[in-house]
Amino acid sequence: MNNNELSKHAVLSLWIKKNIADNTFKIGDKIPSENELASRFMISRQTVRQAIGTLVAEGILIREHGRGTYVNFPVKKEPADKTKRIGVITTYLDDYVFPGIIHGIEEVLTDSGYTMSLGITHNKPSDEENCLLQMMQSGVDAFIVEGTKSALPNFNKRLYEQIKENQIPTVFINGYYSGYNDSYIILDDVKAGEMVADVLIQNGHKCIGGFYKSDDFQGIKRYEGLLKALKKNNLTINDTSIIWYTTEDFKYYFEGSMDHIIMDRLSEVTSVVCYNDLVAASLVRLLKRNGKNIPDDISIVSFDDSFLSKQMVLNLTSIVYPAKKVGKKAAQIILQQLNVSTKPEHVVLDPVLKIRDSVKKL
């Protein structure tokens, strides 16, 4: 490379750094392609590659084979520069079981002199991306994350890889992304799914339906538990009576227009396993407006033992979700990893079943 090319390489490097410094290129942004940069600066692609290679070596950029080059997460801060702030990202915040999780996290972090930076995803990968980028830019020492659409390929894989490369501790709650070895704390959802199905089978139910969430880790695992219970009791699955839904289409199932479809799908079952108490409450309302009584006409079991399980006309048999315990344990793991730098910790909680009045003995 001659001196002229060397100066062009330096000019391009400085231009990229300037655009990062003034937030034209933000963390996680893809920079222009080699061809675009070569054309813009009227230099060879080799010079572009040299400039980018230097910035990759400095940790400013990160290359992804087949995808392009991105602005990297800043080099990890030294201990003296720590923020004492933990990024906490959940699907929801102020309803259902989530206040308990947040309170548990906050209690432990506050006692140790840490604060939280909260983000809500509404189970949308794009919102999770925004939360991660904002927290990475503002600075956090670690993450506690409830993954978004955790049963599907990870939309934000690149960001999590950058976080891992920079040794930022991460703890997942309620599920985890496939292919990662980060710490997590989860309920044993397979066992929980088996337990609620066992209650139905022990009460004489052989035709069991289900209402499960297909885009989240817990939905798949709870369904797996149903299959285990059926197989060990030599019962078969009625595929027609297993209804799957996603975050986006949940509301359409229960607004009224699909009542006839759901009633037809569940026409052969005597009981239904619901993904959680929100689904159970919605299904109970649907069944009632179609002339069905619970548990006389159809039995219902569920997960989470939320306030909903105790506020319906009937008291719902449901797996307990220890929200505050999950939050506290997640915070304890994060503090342990920040202060002691331990290996990833995988915590699986044993489920507890609350038996109430929503199952009829046949």
Image (tube, rainbow, N blue to C red):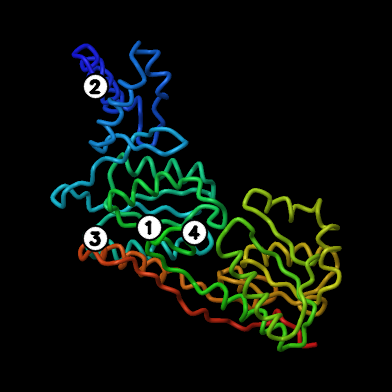
> CA–CA distance between discs 3 and 2?
34 Å
The amino acid on which the numbered mark 1 sits, given as a three-letter code, is Ile
> Relative to residue 10, is residue 147 drawn left or right?
right
Report, in whole angstroms, how far the alpha carbon at label 2 lies from the one at label 4.
38 Å
Q: Secondary structure at mark 4?
A: loop
| Front position among marks 1 and 2 | 2
- Which of the two discs, 4 and 1, labels the residue nearer the N terminus? 1
- The residue indicated by pointer 2 is 14
Q: Nearer the viewer, mark 3 or mark 2?
A: 2
Badge 4 is on which residue? 178
User: What type is the residue that disc 3 sits on?
Assistant: Leu
Q: Quadrant of residue 28?
A: top left
Residue at 33 percent of width and 26 percent of height: 49
Number of marks present in the image shown: 4
* Residue 277 higher or lower than 130, as above or below: below
Left or right? Give the position of 31 relative to 220: left
Instruction: Please provide percent x and percent y for residue 239.
Output: 78, 67
Residue 64 vertical position relative to residue 150 in the rendered view, above or below:
above
The tag earlier along the polypeptide, 3 or 2, is 2
- According to the picture, the residue beneath numbered tag 1 turns out to be 144
Q: Position of residue 338 (x, y in %)?
A: 24, 60
Which image quarter is the C terminus in?
bottom right
Q: 98 or 349: which is nearer to us?
A: 349
- The residue labelled by disc 3 is 338
Work out whether mark 2 precedes mark 4 in sequence or the reverse, and give the earlier one. 2
186 and 156: which one is in front? 156
